Image (cartoon, helix red, strand yellow):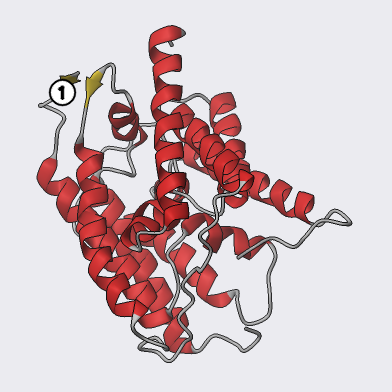
Amino acid sequence: MNIDWAAFTPWSALIGGGLIGLAAAAMILFNGRITGISGITGGLLVPQRGDTAWRAAFVLGLILAPVAWLLTGPLPELRIDADYPLLVIAGLLVGVSTRYGAGCTSGHGVCGLSRLSPRSIVATLLFMGSGFATVFIVRHLLGA
Amino acid sequence: MSRTSSLPVVVSAFLIGLLFGIGLLVAGMANPAKVLAFLDLAGAWDPSLALVMGGAIAVGLVAFRVAGQRKLSLLGEPMRLPARRDIDKRLVLGGLGFGIGWGLAGFCPGPALVALGAGQAKALVFVIAMLAGMAVFELLERRPGKRPAAS
């Protein structure tokens, strides 16, 4: 294994992770909800009375985070190398699969692991594993 | 479940979304190139995202322990903690499929929404495809004879 020390950002990773954890903590302690972004977003597609406003407010907060950030300074680098067809395929897969598997990086990865949920531990190992395998195949076997 | 969410619940959800998004930006997770550098174990590996998860879980462990001892949230909402413990085919296939999509573009749902807010056209395309994928799931769930979706 060849660690890219120049790209390694331990402090911002830990602090950013801590903020993500605080957000998940506030969601369960104040609102009694799991912060599962795929589930919260997916729920907007089948609106149920009284269950839509908080979902929309959360998603709006996420989308406006970069706008709030801009009040303090320039945004950090966001580099998207994938081309449009690949983004469509990836988006479709992420959309179907996160709903099918009842969670993504936030619901299973952050909240589920924090709850020591066996389902989330399995789901996280699987999506990390298939993420590692996918990048290996794309970059090192197909040489893209 | 059918009662309307109170204003404090909606406002807190908005602020939590904002905080979550800022956390993703600070952590570098809203940058697909950095996410893919983490997933590329055989290349020049950037281990940062392991620390993002570590930092989030360190806070989460405490919060969910406290939450588990409460019947109601601080705003008086019921505690909706998942109770399922079974590992079913859906969980396994969903996890595997999500990882493939994540590895192809470097986007998972939260960072994609944040990058959309940052004005990235490519993030908009990803988010539309993701919503279409979620809609496909809902349609498949509504076929006659299908059991209703959990959660």
Could you tell me which quadrant the C terminus of chain B lies in?
bottom right
Q: Quadrant of residue B51?
A: top left
Q: Position of residue B5 (x, y in %)?
A: 54, 85
Outermost residue on the front side: it is B86
Q: Position of residue A108 (x, y in %)?
A: 43, 54
Asked if one can make out residue B125 in the rendered structure from this viewpoint, the answer is: no
Left/right of residue A89 with respect to residue A70 in the rendered view? right
Vertical position of residue B13 compared to residue A70: above or below:
below
Could you tell me which quadrant the N terminus of chain B lies in?
bottom right
Vertical position of residue B81 compared to residue A21: above or below:
below
User: How many C-alpha atoms fall within 10 Å of the one at disc 1: few (<14), some, or many (≥20)?
Assistant: some
Callout 1 amino acid: Ile
SS category of the residue bearing label 1: strand
Q: Residue under label 1, please give it.
A: A3
Q: Position of residue B101 (x, y in %)?
A: 52, 33
Residue under the point 12% across and 42% down: A10
Residue under the point 59% across and 39% down: B93
Q: Position of residue A129 (x, y in %)?
A: 41, 32
Vertical position of residue A20 compared to residue A125: above or below:
below
Q: Quadrant of residue B29?
A: top left
Left/right of residue A93 with respect to residue B52 in the rendered view? right
Image mark 1: chain:
A
